[in-house]
Image (cartoon, rainbow, N blue to C red):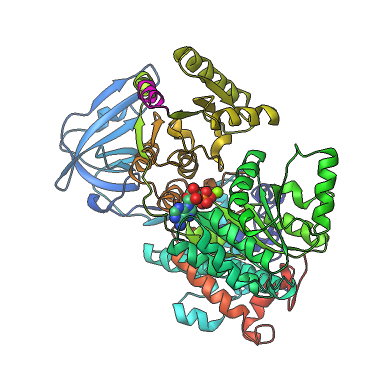
Amino acid sequence: MNKSLQDSVSMIKGVGEDAESNLAVMGIFTVGDLLEHFPYRYDDYRLRDLQEVKHEERITVEGKVHSEPSLVFYNRKRSRLTVHLLVGRYLIKVIFFNQPYLKKKINVQDTITVTGKWDQHRQTITAGEMKIGPYQMTTEFEPVYSIRGKLSVKQLRKFIKQAYQDYSNEIKENIPAFLREKYKLLDRKEAIFSLHFPKSQADVKQARRRIVYEEFLFFQLKMQALRKFERENSGGVSHQYDLTKLKEFISSLPFPLTNAQKRVVNEICADLKSPIRMNRLLQGDVGSGKTAVAAIALYASVTAGYQGALMVPTEILAEQHADSLFQLLEPMGVRLALLTSSVKGKKRNELLERLKDGEIDILIGTHALIQQDVFFHKLGLVITDEQHRFGVEQRRILREKGETPDVLFMTATPIPRTLAITAFGEMDVSTIDEMPAGRKTIETYWVKHEVLERVLGFVEKELSQGRQAYIICPLIEESDKLDVQNAIDVYDMLSNYYSNKYRVGLMHGRLPAQEKDEVMNLFSKNEVQILVSTTVVEVGVNVPNATIMVIYDAERFGLSQLHQLRGRVGRGSAQSFCVLLADPKTEVGKERMKIMTETNDGFVLSEKDLELRGPGDFFGKKQSGLPEFKVADMVHDYRTLETARKDAMELIHLDDFWTNPEYLSLKAFLEHAGIMDGEKLD
Ligand code: ADP
Ligand code: MG
């Protein structure tokens, strides 16, 4: 019988029924799955120089016991034994938890070998293993595998070894030879061997390099193929806009465009003009001037004889956007309309009629406006604001309605470039990376909750000068009762504290839409001076007279989210402030608060957020939608990611891509993903 990596794991000697179901629990069904279950780290038992070891790394050292070990009991079961150890020139501490019996074994002047976790700040090893006597190498490296369920690591190692013995000849190369040569990559079989059975750190490094590239190349190949077919097969609108009018409009703006705005306007206009359908992401920090760019794009579409739509996630935002767009575009003779849930009955019907007859040029509203009973006369451009993950479904709806307008997604959450090209690999990305001149930075402070009293005094000082304040309480889940209660408590407290002097308003996601609007209205008219709110104010809200924001439990937010929130102040000409109330428990938590006080640059913060929290957490768990890689890490391997992206793009555009046998494995992979030559099956 022919062997194949698709064979069931039960074909491997030693894998019985029990083992088979234990492996299944871990998602390992085939021999291929097993061979690609790679170690997630390698325990390194070599002696290492303390100076080379990073914080929290595992380390093995040999040293001389410097003084009598000291033993402390917390209760009958828990204890801590501290040993001072002279390692080369360094005197460090070694701690053993709950092993009191070691005190008798370890004597002053003994040479001992310990393995454990290195705490660089405390110059301490928390020891896992200890041997009396000098270091003796047994194994240099031990692969460590993640396991779940009943399977033991020992069994898993045995199975992998057996699988490699029986099946290694079935491991086929899948990267074209010219690329393997170009980057001097191991072949697939060798790489898999080295990941499971390395002899040295260098082995692992070479093997990893190969697999990381492979994972990225295949992922990017799929993205680039989708992009190519999408462009070739979904005919877009070729906007023949009126350049003279457009220039007139731009010079009518109350400010000159920044260079970054000019650049992205050009990128967008090129897309508008081209018959290929625009599928572009526009990212720019809070306040970088995306609205003006959107207005220019919409106006271009209108001068070409089409209608435009602007979709935003909330009604409040829809109203604000409508306000700014009316101001900018009505003088140009553009007919705008706002469609929200408060437009009802006869008025709504009239509006829809006019839209259908082409008597409205630009429609602004929540995303409901491209659904249900809303029909456009000639829709050319759809812009969506502040929602980075609603592309695919929305595009399907549009297609079903027989419309294929150009689509521009705007987001104020600066996305690190690595994530942008990964999560949005099939899109084009425009970035406004420059702020309009003369912006004041928001002064940010980080304090502990215990000084709340002083913070409230600071807030009062601003209020007494006629300013307004936001007080933000964390809301992690929109439905979380506890968090809402939190906001209500703070609201009660502040209503008391400022009693008759200032009016306090309360805003949270559980309020009916009408009450939300009412509170927001009062706040924007300065009839309410202090707005206690959950994160619902995060997106877009614009009240320039608000100059101070206090954020409770700031350590519970991501950096990008804190930055978004902070962007609600600093919208006028006055100096603005942000106070983070936080008692972070971890080093990373402290680092995060600190960086907030140091920079106002959303891109710097998002890179940092990604670095500190990892890609999974970046978009929030639920909506992550990010691909999972077995070995590759989008943050640390981003250079490889970019290389693979470039290579994938070149490959997919080769004339002989689908016919040259050299690319057979790539072609098979795409076909398996449902992507065929010249068409996309979705
Ligand atoms: P965002 O990118 O957050 O949507 P906005 O478009 O709301 O930013 O712009 C923020 C503020 O900056 C607005 O008051 C807008 O009028 C102003 N603005 C936009 N572009 C410029 C510019 N080039 N020069 C000066 N001010 C600008
Ligand atoms: Mg905006």
* Image-based side of 643 in relation to 32, left or right: left
Q: Pick whichever, 320 or 169, lies toward us.
A: 320
Q: Is residue 143 visible?
A: no
Nearest the eye: 459 or 187: 459
Q: Position of residue 333 (x, y in %)?
A: 66, 58
SS assignment for the magenta stretch, majority:
helix
* Residue at (67, 26) in percent of width and height: 515
Query: Is 46 placed left or right of 578 in the picture?
Result: left
Quarter of the figure that contains the C terminus? bottom right
Q: Does the stretch in magenta take in 458? A: yes
User: Going 40% across and 56% down the picture, which residue do you hit?
Assistant: 141
Residue 237 placement, left or right of 621: right
Verify whether residue 368 appears in magenta. Answer: no
Q: How many discs mark residues in the rendered view?
A: 0
Residue 667 location (% of width, % of height):
68, 77
Q: Quadrant of residue 126?
A: top left
Residue at image point 34% right, 34% down: 445
Q: Is residue 409 above or below residue 202?
A: above
Tell me where residue 153 appears, x and y as whole percent.
54, 48
Residue at position x 31%, y 49% in the image: 54
Return the residue nearer the eye: 92 or 455: 455
- The span picked out in magenta is 456-466
Q: From the image, which quarter does the N terminus lie in?
A: bottom right
Q: Is residue 193 above or below residue 633?
A: below
Along the line of sight, the residue nearer the viewer: 67 or 620: 620
Q: Percent x, y for residue 467?
A: 43, 29
Left or right, residue 55 beside residue 657: left
- Residue 451 visible in the current orientation: yes
Place residue 332 in its image quadrant: bottom right
